[in-house]
Image: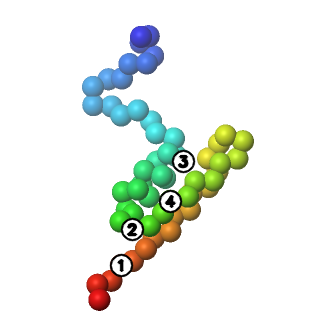
Amino acid sequence: MSASNQQAPGQREAVPRAVQTVLDALEKLRFGAIQLTVHEGKLVQVDVTERHRYPN
């Protein structure tokens, strides 16, 4: 492994914005769906559908 692939202790690898958007949606979503739209192999859109459940 080269030195450029190693990280200093305590540092996190930079996460691409699109991936971070998906991770944030997953953390917040309790019931629902996340739809990813891909064009030419690249993520271009994230749609989040949230469901709210109420007890009877």
**Which amino acid type is marked by label 3?**
Ala
Question: Which residue is disc 4 drawn over?
Answer: 34
* Disc 2 to disc 1, C-alpha distance: 8 Å
Residue type of the residue flagged with mark 1: Arg
Question: Which residue is farthest bottom?
Answer: 56
Q: Secondary structure at mark 3?
A: helix
Which of the two discs, 3 and 2, labels the residue nearer the N terminus? 3
Q: Is residue 16 above or below residue 34?
A: above
Mark 1: few, some, or many residues within 10 Å (few <14, many ≥20)? few
- Quadrant where the image shows the N terminus: top left
Identify the residue position indicated by label 2 in the image: 31
Q: Please identify the quarter of the rendering in which residue 4 is found.
A: top left
Q: Is residue 52 left or right of residue 48?
A: left
Residue beneath label 1, please? 53
Element assignment for label 1:
loop
In the rendered image, which residue does mark 3 sit on?
18
Mark 2: secondary structure: loop
Tag 2–tag 1 contact (CB < 8 Å): yes
Depth check, front residue: 55 or 8: 55
- Disc nearer the start of the sequence (4/1): 4
Of the image marks 3 and 4, the number of the one nearer the N terminus: 3
Give the spatial CA distance, label 4 vs label 1: 17 Å
